[in-house]
Amino acid sequence: MAQTYVNENGYRCFSNSGKQVSRWVAEKKIGRPLKRSEVVHHGSKGKGCNSKSNLTVFKNQSEHMKKKHSRR
Ligand SMILES: [Zn+2]
């Protein structure tokens, strides 16, 4: 298991590359590399949970905010 740390936004990242673990897991889930514009959303288990079932990929930040973070 690679070394990881939690960044200032609360997301777990790999120590060697700085890549978010959630993005890496999402790439495994969809079977291709994520584009830079694509956003990984964490579901009800929160941003500490990087299991495939907790992650959803959106094509850009505005789709992400529209679908999952509508104003409260
Ligand atoms: Zn989100």
Image (cartoon, helix red, strand yellow):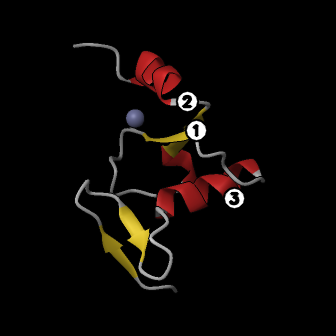
Q: Residues within 10 Å of mark 3 (few under 14, many from 20)?
A: few
Q: Which residue is mark 1?
A: 37
Which residue is located at x 36 percent, y 39 percent?
44
Q: Which circle marks residue 28 in the picture?
A: 3
For the point 32% across and 47% down, the residue is 46
- Secondary element at tag 1: loop
Above/below status of 27 relative to 16: above
Q: Does label 3 point to a residue whose CB lies under 8 Å from ligand 1?
A: no
Image coordinates of residue 26 in percent, x first then y, are 61, 52
Relative to 13, residue 47 above or below:
above
Q: CA distance from mark 1 to mark 3?
A: 17 Å
Position of 49 with respect to 16 (left or right) is left
Q: Which residue is mark 2?
A: 60
| Cβ atoms under marks 3 and 2 closer than 8 Å | no
Q: Amino acid at mark 2?
A: Asn
Give the vertical position of 57 relative to 4 (above or below): above
